[in-house]
Amino acid sequence: MEKLSVMISEEDVLARVAELAAQIAKDYEGKEIKLICILKGSIFFTTELAKRIDLPIKLDFMSVASYGNEMTSSGRVKIVKDLDDSIRGEHVIVIEDIIDSGRTLSFLMDMLKSRQPESLALCTLLDKPSRRVVEVPVDYTGFQIPDEFVVGFGLDYAQRYRALPYIGMIELV
Ligand code: IMP
Ligand code: MG
């Protein structure tokens, strides 16, 4: 059995997304940026963020699978769907739902860097710093959260709960 409770309300998530969008618009003033949405978890965060960034924006999508069970990742990452276009010479911001061990992002950022973007940054909605195994430099963080399993706003538990408009907490009871 799973018990679901609210960790961060929809109102609080959207207010924080607006703050991040304003910060990004300021940092990249006068530039065009490309947001890379890491599917599927980042889809809701990416769209809400993109709508609020007052700059010319391109979007591209990548889907990765990290091997492991529902609640852990092993660090071995497979690209299920690669970007449609080159990022060479572009200002790229990777949009992630959550950084846990850091293994997925560490792999991804290294790989994207090798494709020679003009700049490469990382923006995550959630961060569980206490779980970090591999160090990843994060440029924009929505919320630092404790070591709880969260769902909603794109995040899943066995593919469920992604469409919840808030960040919920799952407990197995
Ligand atoms: P990492 O490689 O351990 O940093 O794993 C990051 C990925 O694990 C995320 O993109 C999520 O897909 C998944 N993940 C980690 N923690 C959670 C959680 O609390 N809820 C849902 N998915 C999570
Ligand atoms: Mg997942």
Image (cartoon, rainbow, N blue to C red):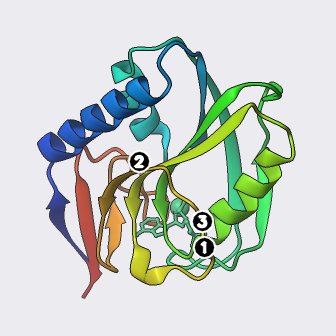
Q: Residue at x 45, y 30 (%)?
A: 27
Q: Callout 1: few (<14), some (14-19), or many (20+) C-alpha neighbours within 10 Å?
A: few
- Identify the amino acid type marked 3: Val
Circle 2: residue type = Gly
Is 38 on the left or on the right of 27, as rendered?
A: right
Instruction: Say whether residue 39 is visible.
Output: no
As displayed, is residue 44 above or below residue 68? above
Q: Which badge, 2 or 3, is on the more N-terminal residue?
A: 3
Residue 9 x %, y %: 14, 51
Q: Which residue is mark 3?
A: 136
**Which residue is located at x 59 percent, y 22 percent?**
33
Return the residue at label 1: 135
Mark 3 beta carbon near ligand 1 (under 8 Å): yes
Q: Is mark 2 within 8 Å of ligand 1?
A: no
Image location (x, y in percent) of residue 78: 80, 60
In percent of width and height, residue 70 lies at 53, 74
**Mark 1: amino acid:** Glu
Whether residues under marks 3 and 1 lie with C-beta atoms below 8 angstroms apart, the answer is yes
Tell me the residue that label 2 is attached to.
154
Q: Residues within 10 Å of mark 2 (few under 14, many from 20)?
A: many
Q: Contact (CB < 8 A) between labels 2 and 3?
A: no
